[in-house]
Every structure is written in structure tokens, then in C-alpha cells.
Image: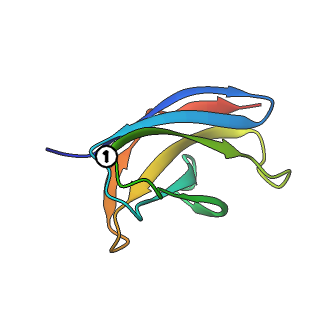
Amino acid sequence: MKPVISFVEIENRVISATYRRMMVRAKVVLVEKASGRQLPDPVTTIASPVPVGAVRIRLPDTVKPGTYFLKALNGHGEDAAQSADFEIA
């Protein structure tokens, strides 16, 4: 079964998301939809060996308003899952 990452909400520049079937050491990155560019920061690593959980990602001030999505990369750096698009104001 494929891994899943789901955007939950953004509040005070903190993104909340849930994941399922994610491997330990998977990375969650933020991608700007318009350019397809993966932002170098923030990058969150799944540390829990449990394949179900949640992450909270604090956005640095360098993240500009726009449409984004979360992308999960497996331990080999390959695409594993992608969230729905969401807006950062």
C-alpha cells in the first residue's frame, strides 16, 4: 500500500499534517506549486518507527505567500506521497 500524507491546517505559520504507511527516515518537504521547486527549508524527518503519525512544520520567514503542497520522500530520496494543495498567506 502506498504512503499517504495529508495536509490538515496552517495556523500561525505552522503546518499540521498526518501521515500513514510512512517509513522511518522519510523526509517531508514543502514544494511551491507554481514552479515545482522543492524548498530547502523546512525539511522534516520522520523519526518514529510507527508508520502512522502527525508532523508540525514551522515555516521560516523566507517562505513567501502562494500555493504549496507537502511531498514525502522515502529513505532513498524517491517520491513517496504528496498532499493536496494549500495556500500560505
Q: Nearer the viewer, residue 77 or 23?
A: 23
Q: How is the image coloured?
A: rainbow
Residue ID for mark 1: 51
Q: Nearer the viewer, residue 4 or 38?
A: 4
Determine whether 72 is above or below 10 in the image: below
Q: Nearer the viewer, residue 61 or 36?
A: 61
Q: Residues within 10 Å of mark 1 (few under 14, many from 20)?
A: few
User: Type of residue at label 1?
Assistant: Pro
Determine whether 15 is above or below 80 in the image: above
Q: Which residue occupies 39% across, 45% down?
A: 82
Name the residue at the left extreme: 1
Q: Position of residue 47 (x, y in %)?
A: 47, 58
Q: Which residue occupies 26% across, 45% down?
A: 21
User: Quick one: quadrant of the N terminus?
Assistant: top left
80 lies left or right of 87: left
Q: Name the image quarter holding residue 49.
A: bottom left
Q: Secondary structure at mark 1?
A: loop
Name the residue at the front extreme: 49
Q: Position of residue 6 (x, y in %)?
A: 43, 33
Q: Which residue occupies 52% across, 34% down?
A: 17
Q: Nearer the viewer, residue 67 or 29?
A: 29
Q: Position of residue 84 (x, y in %)?
A: 44, 32
56 lies left or right of 48: right
Q: Position of residue 65 (x, y in %)?
A: 76, 39
User: Quick one: quadrant of the C terminus?
Assistant: top right
Determine whether 76 is above or below 57 in the image: below
